[in-house]
Image (cartoon, grey):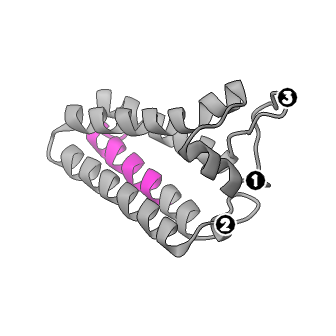
C-alpha cells in the first residue's frame, strides 16, 4: 500500500493526465475538442494545469490541507457547472457553452426528459477529483 502522500501525488498526476488528454486531444465520441477554439482549449488546459501543479507542490511539501481545500473548490465548480442543468434542464452561463460543445459525446447517466447530460469524460474527471480530495484528507 502506498503512503497517503504518495497516493495523493499519484492521483494528482493521473487527474492531470486525464484532464489534459481530454482537453487537448479530440477523442470523439468521448469528447469533442473540435467544437472548441484553440484559445478555449489553451485557456482551459492552462488554468487547470496551473491548479493541479499548485496542488502537486502543496501536497509534496506537506500542505495537504490547503491542497484539499483547493481541490474541494475545483470539484465544486465542476459539479456546479454540470449538475444544475442535468437535474433541472435549465443550463445557465458557461453550462450552455459546455453543453453545446459536448453534444454527441458519450453519456452514461440516466436521461432526465430532454435535459442535457453530463459527458462520460467529465464524470471520470469528477470521480478522479473526488478521489484526490479524499486522499488529501487522509
Question: Which residue is located at x 16 percent, y 38 percent?
Answer: 63
Sequence-wise, the earlier of marks 1 and 3 is 1
Measuring from the top left, give residue 66's x and y in whole percent: 21, 35
* Percent position of residue 2, x then y: 35, 41
| Mark number displayed over residue 113 | 3
Q: Which residue is most to the bottom?
A: 38
Do we see residue 73 in this rendering?
A: yes
Q: Secondary structure at mark 2?
A: helix
Q: Main secondary structure of the magenta part?
A: helix
Q: CA distance from mark 1 to mark 3?
A: 16 Å
Front in this rendered view, residue 56 or 37: 37
What segment is highlighted magenta in the picture? 1-17
User: Element type at marker 1?
Assistant: loop
- Image-based side of 10 in relation to 111, left or right: left
Q: Report the side of 2 relative to 67 (left or right).
A: right
Q: Secondary structure at mark 3?
A: loop
Q: Residue at x 80, y 30 (%)?
A: 110
List the residue tagged with mark 1. 103
Q: Is residue 97 magenta?
A: no
Residue situated in front as seen by the camera: 55 or 34: 34
Amino acid at each position: 500500500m502506498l503512503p497517503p502522500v504518495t497516493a495523493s501525488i499519484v492521483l494528482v498526476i493521473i487527474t492531470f493526465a486525464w484532464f489534459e488528454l481530454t482537453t487537448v486531444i479530440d477523442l470523439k465520441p468521448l469528447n469533442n475538442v473540435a467544437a472548441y477554439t484553440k484559445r478555449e482549449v489553451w485557456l482551459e488546459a492552462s488554468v487547470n494545469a496551473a491548479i493541479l501543479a499548485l496542488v502537486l507542490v502543496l501536497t509534496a511539501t506537506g500542505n495537504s490541507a490547503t491542497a484539499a481545500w483547493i481541490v474541494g473548490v475545483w470539484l465544486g465548480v465542476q459539479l456546479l457547472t454540470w449538475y444544475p442543468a442535468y437535474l433541472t434542464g435549465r443550463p445557465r452561463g458557461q453550462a450552455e457553452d459546455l453543453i453545446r460543445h459536448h453534444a454527441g459525446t458519450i453519456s452514461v447517466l440516466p436521461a432526465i426528459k430532454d435535459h442535457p447530460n453530463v459527458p462520460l469524460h467529465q464524470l471520470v474527471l469528477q470521480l478522479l477529483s473526488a478521489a484526490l480530495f479524499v486522499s488529501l484528507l487522509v
